[in-house]
Amino acid sequence: MVTWRDDDTPPAPRIGALGWLLVALRAPLLVLLTYGGLILLLLLRMPERAFCGLGRPVTPYITQAVCRAALAILGIRLTVRGQPMRGQGGIVANHSSWLDIFTLNACDRVYFVSKAEVAAWPGIGWLARATGTVFITRDPREAKDQQALFEARLRAGHRLLFFPEGTSTDGRRVLPFKPTLFAAFFTEGLSAIHIQPVTVIYHAPKGQDPRFLGWWGDMAFGPHLLKLMASPRSARAEVIFHPPLAAAGFAGRKQLCATAEAAVRAPLTEAIGQP
């Protein structure tokens, strides 16, 4: 079994003949699935926007189907515990990898909140914009405009999913949650909605380091994707939906943030046997 120190990032993958065969089979399928789904989504989004404005009654189902199929192609089994909430509100989850986008979209029809830099990433940026991602910056001068956009999307009935850690980890820990975006749930007319905490736990293929699916630090996207496509053994993504939290039941954003963090952290701590 390969092991790495806690402060290491994984070495470059060593791919054998079987691995390259799997890459040759999986890569075209992923490209066809992802961009074929994107074309279909964009074609349907035009009339959807004309008749429904911010509402998206159809296209989120395409995103969900594509993400489920992508996980299957990569050999990642998905298991779900609990139920996604059906009402409007927000979802918060721990952040371990770019795979979180596929994993969480496969479970529920949600819209992600992402840092603005992602919009400029080749390929991924197009997908993010097409699927309704809300982009935010760290510029304090834009904080009010960004909160207004956040609130508008919530009022339109969108379930916005954000990662309060602010960065991805190796999947073996949960960083302290930042309470900034929780403030939107305490504005007039939105305090009646809910926040649902969600825990994502990745289980590596047999014989691999437990952090096999994690993507953090300075890790490059290409080699990480190549490693996953070349893996002959299946991995598993476990998603746990916790009971939604009513914003009106909390004194403020910091209390709501701390409660959501505790709910997300508990199953991961239990699964890996460490804080």
Image (cartoon, rainbow, N blue to C red):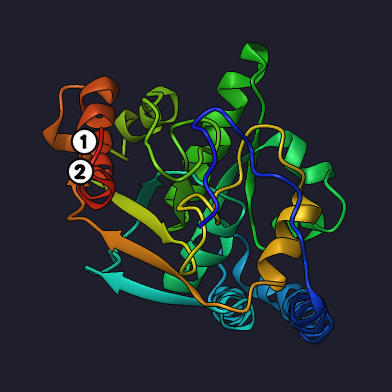
Q: Which residue bears the numbered disc 2?
A: 266
The one of 220 and 56 positioned closer to us in this rendering: 220
Q: Is residue 138 left or right of residue 38?
A: left
Q: Amino acid at mark 2?
A: Ala
x, y percentage for residue 226? 76, 63
| Residue at x 55%, y 52% (from the top left corner) | 2
| Residue at x 37%, y 56% (from the top left corner) | 201
User: Separation of disc 2 and disc 1 at Cα?
Assistant: 6 Å
Q: Which residue bears the numbered disc 1?
A: 262
* Label 2 CA crowd tier, 10 Å (few <14, some 14–19, many 20+): few
191 over 155 or under it: above or below: above
Q: Is residue 183 left or right of residue 168?
A: left
77 over 128 or under it: above or below: below
| Residue at x 64%, y 20% (from the top left corner) | 138
| Residue at x 66%, y 12% (from the top left corner) | 141
In the image, farthest residue toward the top: 141
The one of 274 and 114 positioned closer to us in this rendering: 274
Q: Secondary structure at mark 2?
A: helix
Q: Amino acid at mark 1?
A: Ala
Residues marked 2 and 1 touching at CB (< 8 Å): yes
Q: Is residue 182 left or right of residue 50?
A: left
* Label 1 CA crowd tier, 10 Å (few <14, some 14–19, many 20+): some
The one of 12 and 174 positioned closer to us in this rendering: 12
